[in-house]
Image (cartoon, helix red, strand yellow):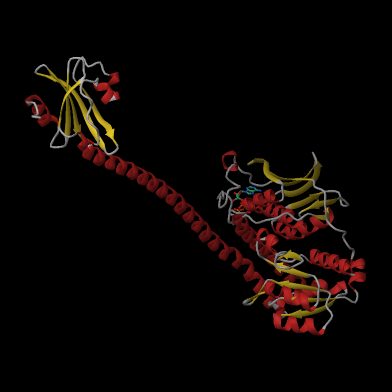
């Protein structure tokens, strides 16, 4: 059937060369004639004489009182068209213009734009993450560089004294006691510095674990005093320790000592005249240690930042790296305690306070030196460490225990000693040159089924979960504590016999 002129005009205006289908309607909007191929739009023709809404239900909402257009109507599975209703020259037409192609292209563009948006967002998020990581890396690198610069200076100074005085002693140019005192003081300072640095590394790696032990305040405070007294005396400061001698407390000795020494070191550093004091009380089921000084104090505005790493107030000429308080606070957290600046003013000085909640000790029996000797008499220990100085040190630690001591610097010697002698307990380092001692546990245990204790400087959180799986019976952190070493050995020997 010939397409009416009016429809032709309409199509030229709207269709832009794409497929079409046209239905002419009567006055009651029933289908009258059809023009074009319905199947090109994937549809069947309408039934003539029947309402057009039967053919296209979407028209139900239309009033047909004026021309209208429904754009992008999904007319069949693969076809989308614009639906036009128009009256021209008193004739009524429903014209479907195929817009599938343009629809699909638009959809593709939309999809593309959507994907592009997602990619852009992802990219934005990635570059934000990257910027954060970069900033963290930069900060961590700066911190490391600061740490190394500070360490070379801080370690170099006491080492010079240690080397100088030991040389003088070797040449007998100086009074032995005086020389040894200076060497010891500097070595203690070095040890503190190294421990702080190691802890800094461990706190970064999140690996400190609490170890509760019984200790008398007298023992705890006298070691601390022996370290701080020479420093205070060198500045003519009065030093006072306020506690009841016979009090025995359950505490993480190493960490508490480390914190208190850091605080007292600071008290000495930042006090030019007057006194420093360490006070102990029990309050609200907590041990309360207060470090008080009459020093330069910290202004209110600076009090918030002193616990952050690398924060220093450059008011005093005292040297420091600015990690002492940061580390002390991390240590306090690790042992479940709280470290805070209780008071500080330029006028009166400062009070730092360490609050340690009292905890029950689940520890095993503590053996006296006499009991230790009795238990260890006739027993023997094999100590394996590739550092001869450490072997000698442990030998000295165990000298009064009564144990027979065998030492080996490598696993081959250790194996031979184990083959030829009756051994009751083995104490071994983790790294022995290229060899790791865990690869020998099975073999040694099959030769003589004895407890094996591991000594290691690896972060405790890491090793504490590993050592049992590796076959060791206990682990002791380095640097070794002589008392802890002896107590651990005795516990195993009593268990065995
Ligand atoms: P460092 O002493 O190595 O600089 P710290 O972390 O121990 O680092 O202390 C951070 C800063 O807090 C110090 O630089 C000092 O300004 C201030 N500070 C710490 N303790 C005291 C104190 N007892 N009196 C006055 N200022 C102190």
- Quarter of the figure with residue 491: bottom right
Q: Outermost residue toward the left? A: 5
Question: Residue 109 versus residue 238: which sits nearer the camera?
Answer: 109
Quick check: can you spot residue 459?
yes
- Quarter of the figure with residue 169: bottom right
Quarter of the image with the C terminus in it = bottom right
In the image, residue 338 sits, relative to residue 203, either above or below, namely: above
Q: Residue shown at 80%/63% (left/top)?
A: 484
Quick check: can you spot residue 293?
no
Q: Residue shown at 69%/56% (left/top)?
A: 235
Question: Residue 83 versus residue 121: which sits nearer the camera?
Answer: 83
In the image, residue 433 sits, relative to residue 14, either above or below, namely: below
Quarter of the image with the N terminus in it = top left
Horizontal and vertical percent for residue 239? Answer: 76, 52
Is residue 204 toward the left or the right of residue 376 in the image? left
Is residue 435 toward the left or the right of residue 32 in the image? right
In the image, residue 350 sits, relative to residue 83, either above or below, namely: below
Question: Residue 316 versus residue 303: which sits nearer the camera?
Answer: 303
Horizontal and vertical percent for residue 48? Answer: 20, 23
Q: Residue shown at 56%/39% (left/top)?
A: 301
Is residue 198 toward the left or the right of residue 336 in the image? left
Q: How many marks?
A: 0
Horizontal and vertical percent for residue 96? Answer: 20, 30
Question: Residue 134 versus residue 448: which sits nearer the camera?
Answer: 448
Horizontal and vertical percent for residue 7? Answer: 11, 26
Is residue 487 toward the left or the right of residue 304 in the image? right
């Amino acid at each position: 059937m010939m397409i009416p002129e009016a429809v032709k005009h309409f199509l030229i205006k709207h269709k832009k060369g794409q497929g079409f289908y046209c239905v002419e309607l009567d006055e009651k909007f029933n289908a009258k004639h059809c023009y074009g191929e319905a199947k090109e739009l994937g549809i069947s023709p309408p039934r003539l004489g029947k309402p057009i809404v039967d053919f296209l239900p979407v028209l139900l909402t239309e009033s047909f009182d004026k021309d209208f257009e429904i754009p992008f109507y999904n007319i069949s599975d693969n076809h989308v068209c614009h639906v036009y209703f128009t009256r021209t020259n008193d004739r009524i037409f429903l014209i479907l213009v195929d817009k599938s192609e343009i629809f699909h292209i638009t959809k593709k563009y939309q999809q593309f734009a959507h994907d592009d948006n997602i990619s852009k967002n992802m990219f934005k998020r990635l570059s934000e993450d990257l910027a954060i990581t970069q900033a963290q890396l930069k900060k961590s690198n700066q911190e490391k560089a600061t740490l190394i610069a500070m360490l070379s200076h801080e370690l170099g100074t006491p080492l010079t004294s240690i080397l100088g005085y030991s040389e003088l002693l070797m040449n007998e140019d100086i009074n032995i006691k005086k020389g040894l005192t200076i060497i010891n003081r500097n070595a203690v300072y070095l040890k503190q510095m190294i421990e702080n640095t190691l802890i800094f590394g461990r706190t970064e790696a999140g690996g400190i674990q609490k170890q509760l032990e019984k200790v008398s305040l007298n023992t705890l405070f006298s070691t601390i005093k022996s370290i701080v007294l020479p420093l205070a005396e060198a500045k003519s400061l009065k030093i006072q320790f306020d506690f009841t001698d016979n009090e025995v407390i359950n505490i993480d000795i190493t960490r508490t000592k480390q914190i208190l020494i850091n605080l007292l070191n600071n008290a000495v550093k930042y006090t030019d005249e007057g006194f420093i004091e360490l006070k102990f009380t029990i309050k609200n089921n907590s041990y309360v240690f207060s470090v008080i000084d009459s020093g330069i104090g910290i202004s209110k505005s600076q009090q918030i930042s002193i616990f952050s790493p690398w924060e220093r107030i450059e008011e005093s000429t005292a040297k420091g790296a600015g990690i002492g308080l940061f580390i002390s606070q991390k240590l306090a957290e690790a042992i479940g305690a709280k470290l805070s600046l209780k008071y500080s003013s330029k006028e009166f000085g400062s009070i730092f306070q360490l609050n340690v909640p009292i905890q029950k000790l689940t520890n095993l029996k503590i053996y006296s030196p006499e009991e230790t000797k009795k238990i260890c008499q006739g027993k023997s220990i094999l100590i394996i460490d590739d550092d001869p100085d450490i072997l000698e040190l442990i030998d000295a630690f165990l000298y009064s225990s009564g144990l027979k001591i065998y030492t080996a610097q490598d696993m081959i010697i250790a194996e031979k000693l184990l083959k030829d002698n009756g051994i009751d307990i083995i104490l071994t380092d983790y790294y022995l040159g290229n060899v790791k001692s865990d690869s020998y546990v099975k073999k040694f245990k099959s030769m003589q089924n004895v407890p094996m204790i591991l000594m290691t400087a690896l972060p405790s959180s890491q090793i504490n979960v590993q050592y049992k799986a590796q076959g060791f019976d206990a682990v002791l952190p380095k640097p070794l504590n002589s008392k802890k070493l002896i107590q651990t050995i005795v516990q195993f020997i009593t268990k065995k016999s």
